[in-house]
Amino acid sequence: MSVTTASTIGLTSRNVDPGFGALLQSEWTKLRSLRSTWIMVSLAIGLSIGFSALIALTSGLTHDSWNDDVRAAFDPVLTTNSGSLFGCILLIVLGVTAVTSEYSSRMVRTTFIVNPRRYQVFAAKAMVVGLLGLVITAISIPGMFLVSQPIFGHYGLETASVTDSATYRILIIIILTQVLNYALIPFSIAWLLRGTASAITVSLGFLWLPWMLGPILPVWVKQNVLRYLPDVAANSLSGITKADTAQYLGQTPAVMVIAIWLTGLLAAAAFVLNRRDV
């Protein structure tokens, strides 16, 4: 009797053990069930496109008063990306709250009771956050571009076509790097800190303070520190950071910098999750 019972328990345990596909479905269900998720998605897309249109309109209305340097610096592709400020902030919030909402509600304990393989849960949640971030940027970045170009054209400013290979390349780079830097890096930081406010604050500081303080920092800091940070490296890839500046990195080094930061933070987060009590 005891052998039969033990065998039955073992078979039942194996039968109910969720596979990775079930974990993905579970993590997606948890994320989409939050009203805040859809609010963030809607705001990220709507505010990015709307703010980009406003910047394009402002550029059109004021371009007659531009000096020669401003005219020479105008780029019809990169200027549209200025509207992604709000989208990037909301990507950070999305990446953080996907993790910290479970800690604040204590649901994380249930998650790991159902599936004690923490690495699998971590990977499934990272994939869900990354894919949702990709959907947001894949809609907002081309949307910002498409809404801005007719406005530029109406006011006689230079325009760009999405069919142009250089334009297409820049848009793809921005789409991908925003997901990696603004969704998955904050996602990793959230696992390390477990607090919503602290994780958002650290993420904003890590990603934006170098960019904000760059103009007032010494050249050696830009060359030896700033350009090896993920957001600055992404700007080199997209062309926001020009080749003649101290913060510029070549294409291959920039890709490596982003990959090292992302891989390192994800690995650190997974390690801490596996070692620390929930």
Image (cartoon, rainbow, N blue to C red):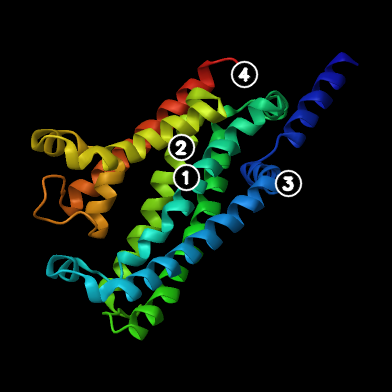
Quadrant of res 225: top left
Q: Residues within 10 Å of mark 3 (few under 14, many from 20)?
A: few
Q: Mark 1 points at which residue?
A: 183
At horizontal 18% and vertical 71% (from top left) the residue drawn is: 71
Looking at marks 2 and 4 on the same chain, the residue that comes earlier in the sequence is marked by: 2
At horizontal 18% and vertical 38% (from top left) the residue drawn is: 216
Instruction: Give SS at disc 2.
Output: helix
Marks 1 and 4 sit apart, C-alpha to C-alpha, by 23 Å
**Residue 177 visible in the displayed image:** yes
Q: Which of 76 and 94 is in front in this view?
A: 76
Marks 1 and 2 sit apart, C-alpha to C-alpha, by 6 Å
Indicate whether 10 appears above or below 160: above
Q: Nearer the viewer, mark 1 or mark 4?
A: 1
- Badge 3 amino acid: Ser
Indicate whether 219 appears above or below 21: above
At horizontal 26% and vertical 74% (from top left) the residue drawn is: 63
Q: Mark 3 points at which residue?
A: 33
